[in-house]
Amino acid sequence: MYTPSLSSSHIDRAIVPAAGYGTRMRPLTHAIPKEMLPLGRKPALEYVLEELREAKIQRALFVISPRKQMIRDYFGDGSAWGVRCEYVVQPQMLGLGDAVLRGEAWVQERPFVVAFGDCVIETQGEPPLARLLRTHAAQGADATVLTERIAPERTRRYGIVAPVGRAEGAFPLSDIVEKPEPEQAPSHLAVAARWALSPRIFCYLRRLRPDSGGELNLTDAVRSWIAEGGRVWAVAMGEGESRCDIGGWETYLKAAAKAAACDPEFGEAVRKMLREEAARP
């Protein structure tokens, strides 16, 4: 049984986009959705669901492709995790904005979270998402985004925010740019796979024109919102918090190795093996 929403302003639901092709992880992702690749003893997407539960999210809508029935088979109705899981199909991969639009009717004109299904947030304590939700409510924001400081050369891979004032803790934004070149980036703060959004975002998503790749970008919709006076805030990831993007081989293999090395039963043996391998001539 699922408890009802705490109040009309409490965010109790999340859209989890998990329909992408996983092209950077082929050929493996021809058989296994990238979101279901293992990190230690669990698929990556299970960590995302557990994070949502810890942040008091009670309902999750997985946006999946026709080829990702494995996700539905594994999580079912979500009762094993204490989060009600539902599903909608994104027939064509037309970008994150299109994936979010698939959840418009499900959201029922309530604020909601967007949690990218191919990114795990690592933390030693309370999930940053909980802090993001508190900021969103306290500031009466239209949109609030988690951010991570990245190396300048990586800006072309992410949405990059333009902070107002010092980019520490929680701070307002004056702009957000999708995948800028390093010399054009307004900062080195990247969108870190978690959003809190007012349902008004759907108005801006429906007005978007596809980019050169035929996709609708959530960041472009938020940028239009800011330009029209929308109140958009950011929350910086703190010490001991990091994002693990499992959509590419380098980041996934590092995360998988770390998970194996931290296994409560076999981690010591894995660490010993890694030390021995590193010592080989």
Image (cartoon, rainbow, N blue to C red):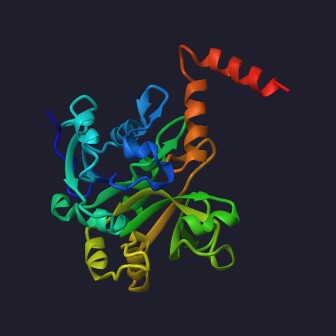
As drawn, 139 above or below 220: above
Residue 240, position as x, y percentages in the image = 61, 41
| Res 264 → quadrant | top right
Q: Residue furthest bottom?
A: 228
Q: In the picture provided, is 150 more to the left or to the right than 248?
A: right
Residue 257, position as x, y percentages in the image = 60, 32
Question: Residue at position x 25%, y 60% from top?
Answer: 90
In this view, the residue in front, 16 or 232, is 16
In this view, the residue in front, 33 or 220, is 33
Q: Residue furthest right?
A: 281
Residue 236, position as x, y percentages in the image = 56, 57
Quadrant in the picture for the C terminus: top right
Q: In the picture provided, is 164 more to the left or to the right than 281?
A: left
Question: Residue at position x 37%, y 72% from top?
Answer: 215
As drawn, 17 above or below 175: above
Q: Is residue 141 visible?
A: no
Number of marks present in the image shown:
0
| Res 209 → quadrant | bottom left
Q: Is residue 15 visible?
A: yes
As drawn, 16 above or below 215: above
Residue 206, position as x, y percentages in the image = 26, 78
Quadrant in the picture for the N terminus: top left
As drawn, 4 above or below 133: above
Question: Residue at position x 64%, y 68% from top?
Answer: 166
